[in-house]
Amino acid sequence: MGKDWGKILIGVRREKLVIGNFFDNWTLFLVQGGMRDGDGVAIAQAQPAHHAANELGRKLMASKFDTLCIIDSDASFPINTLEKMRRLQAGQEFDILQAFYVTRSFPMTPLWLMWDDEKKFWTRKDVRTEKTEEVNAVGFHFTLIRRAVLEKLARPWFYYPRDEGSTEDVPFCTDAREAGFRVGATSEVKTRHWGEYPFGWGEYQEQLVRRELAGEASPPFNAPPPT
């Protein structure tokens, strides 16, 4: 049986400029019941992504919260997204859990990352059903991270490795897995990704159907994928 996520510190990595759509989602999330009593909020702004993530991690460690929920400022999400994440029993088996999202570029690609035989990250394509399962790494678009992970890993927790082309999420998940923690992704809880317009589950499923009707194969894998 899984473990509850406890009291959650909701942390936003806010860019210098935030689009109005995110501001609307975030405001409704805060004022219309997207949080439970005992949860808190932290903001890291105008920094590279890995510096902002480390700032949020330090704020968690200086507090009594049990879990960090990282939300990026290009996310679009209903106000009940966090509640659905914390209530998802299958998700409670994991120490890091990501809500579903896709790249904000064509072709849309789910950010469910797996190793290939040569230990390079490849993007998992064609997530057609609602499920929750273990993966090798996730992005931090709307993601829960248990306090125990940060307590065990060395600082800085989030960093860009040299000469690998990966972002801060991949090495963090790799370090966490090597330390014995489990990483999961779910399509039972869905968010969207703001680009020129929002990319999400519905648009992604339509893309799969269009490609099948056109007789097109899935696009080649990329390592690492764009985020």
Image (cartoon, rainbow, N blue to C red):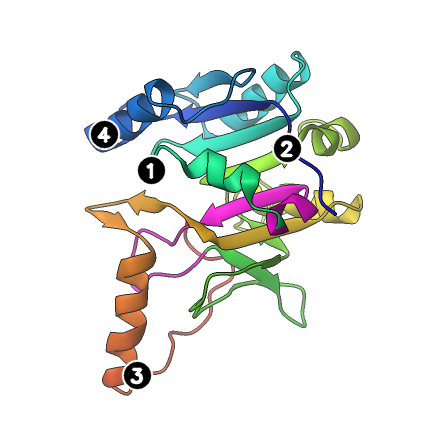
Q: CA distance from mark 4 to mark 3?
A: 35 Å
Q: Disc 2 to disc 1, how far (Cα)? A: 19 Å
**Image-quadrant location for residue 27:** top left
- The mark that comes first in sequence, 4 or 3, is 4
Task: Identify residue for label 1.
Answer: 78
Q: Provide the secondary structure element on which disc 3 rests.
A: loop
Asked if one can make out residue 198 in the rendered structure from this viewpoint, the answer is: yes
Q: Disc 3 residue type? A: Glu
In this rendered view, identify the residue nearer to me: 55 or 60.
Answer: 60
Q: Amino acid at mark 4?
A: Ile
Q: Residue furthest top?
A: 62
Q: What range is drawn magenta here?
A: 90-110
Measure the C-alpha gap from mark 2 to mark 3: 42 Å
Q: Position of residue 26 (x, y in %)?
A: 33, 26
Picture coordinates of residue 123, whole percent (x, y): 50, 63
Q: Is residue 108 magenta?
A: yes
Q: Earlier in the sequence, mark 2 or mark 3?
A: 2
Label 4: state its secondary structure.
loop
Q: Which mark is residue 180?
A: none
Q: Secondary structure at mark 2?
A: loop
Q: On residue 216, which mark appears?
A: 3
For residue 131, above or below residue 128:
above
Residue 19, label in figure: 4
Label located before the other in sequence (1 or 3): 1
